[in-house]
Image: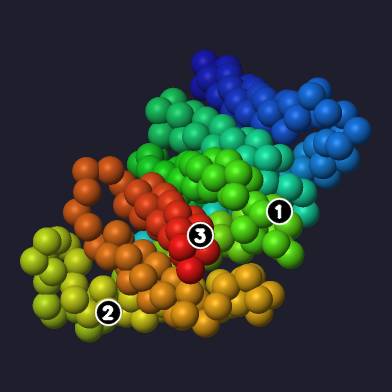
């Protein structure tokens, strides 16, 4: 009886693992049905990248999980934050390699794959082939607990790009000589880096030095907020500088205004005690703020 049960479990694991990847590959090739000449090579390359990434996760999980499964909660939280940052920056890689529209399909693919993994693992209590890798990257001490934070981080990346890309396409002439692709690349990357690195800085500073709680959020500290503001301003300074200031698209006054306002608001959004997960709201609000602010300043100044 136990052997039959074990075989049945292995079959379910194999079925779900293959099914999720198969549907993910189908999502990536959808654009090629609308414009084969433009997207066939993007679809093929993306399938190879994403399937290779999943294969790498399987190998990583087998090698790494046993070493980290007993790590403490603080280490787990830090690992999760690093995973969120890397996952969000995958869209920057996609934009760099392909274009913003196709990158949205790549992100939807990741949303599907990761979301279905959570359904199968946390809901059906089945460990898929790449489950150990996800656990090693941030769920060491919370087996079978839904990975809401990281799924929200992936979903927010899709929403940020999905909101920014159409707006920037409409106003793309404002950013010449940068093309639409590179405009989206710099603004999207800045948005997620403000959230990812700023949030991690706030966590580290708050954990070590946080003594003064924020009036509007007792779970956050003033020390963490200050660290977040400084790091977010630095991130905005670097990426907006590389994308728009060096290319002469924005003046010094617009540059400084963007850096201060976007960095400060990005950190402030992370400190808010909202009903929704801040892994969803912070990058989305930051991305919308940066997009609308830079367009507004370019129009009026």
Instruction: Quote the CA–CA distance across marks 3 and 2.
Output: 31 Å
Q: Position of residue 120 (x, y in %)?
A: 49, 29
x, y percent for residue 155:
48, 42
Question: In front of the other: label 1 or label 3?
Answer: 3
The residue lying toward the viewer, choosing from 233 and 271, is 233
Spot occupied by residue 131 in the image (x, y as percentages of width and height): 54, 43
> Which of 156/76 is in front?
156
Which residue has dot 3 on it?
A: 299
Dot 1: what SS?
A: helix
Q: State the residue at coordinates (54%, 45%).
A: 167
Answer yes or no: is residue 236 visible: yes
Q: How far separated are the C-alphas under marks 2 and 1?
A: 33 Å
Classify residue 26 by image quadrant.
top right
Q: Which residue is mark 2?
A: 226
Query: Mark 1 = which residue?
Result: 181
Which residue is rendered at x = 19% and y = 54% of the image?
273
Query: Under tag 2, what secondary structure?
Result: helix
Give the distance between the C-alpha atoms of the residues marked 1 and 3, in whole angstroms: 20 Å
SS assignment at label 3: helix
Identify the residue at horizontal 48%, vertical 74% (top origin).
254
């Amino acid at each position: 009886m136990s052997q039959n049960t074990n075989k049945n479990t292995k079959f379910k694991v194999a079925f779900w693992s293959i099914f999720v990847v198969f549907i993910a590959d189908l999502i990536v090739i959808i654009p090629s049905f609308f414009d084969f000449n433009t997207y066939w090579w993007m679809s093929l390359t993306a399938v190879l990248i994403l399937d290779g990434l999943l294969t790498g996760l399987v190998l990583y999980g087998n090698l790494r999980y046993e070493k980290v499964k007993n790590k403490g909660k603080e280490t787990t939280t830090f690992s999760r934050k690093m995973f969120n940052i890397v996952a969000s920056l995958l869209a920057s890689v996609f934009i760099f390699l392909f274009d913003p529209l196709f990158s949205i399909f790549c992100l939807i693919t990741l949303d599907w794959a990761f979301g279905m993994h959570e359904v199968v693992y946390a809901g059906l209590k089945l460990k898929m082939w790449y489950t150990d890798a996800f656990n090693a990257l941030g769920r060491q001490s919370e087996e079978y607990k839904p990975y809401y934070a990281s799924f929200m981080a992936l979903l927010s990346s899709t929403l940020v790009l999905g909101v920014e890309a159409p707006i920037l396409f409409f106003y793309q002439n404002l950013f010449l000589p940068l093309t639409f692709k590179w405009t989206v690349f710099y603004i999207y990357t800045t948005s997620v880096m403000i959230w990812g690195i700023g949030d991690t800085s706030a966590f580290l500073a708050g954990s070590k030095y946080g003594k003064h709680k924020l009036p509007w959020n007792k779970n956050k500290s003033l020390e963490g907020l200050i660290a977040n503001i400084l790091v977010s301003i630095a991130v905005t300074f670097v990426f907006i500088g590389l994308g728009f200031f060096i290319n002469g698209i924005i003046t010094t006054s617009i540059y400084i205004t963007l850096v201060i306002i976007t960095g400060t608001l990005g950190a402030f959004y992370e400190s808010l005690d909202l009903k929704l997960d801040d892994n969803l709201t912070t990058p989305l609000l930051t991305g919308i703020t940066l997009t609308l602010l830079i367009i507004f300043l370019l129009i009026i100044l």
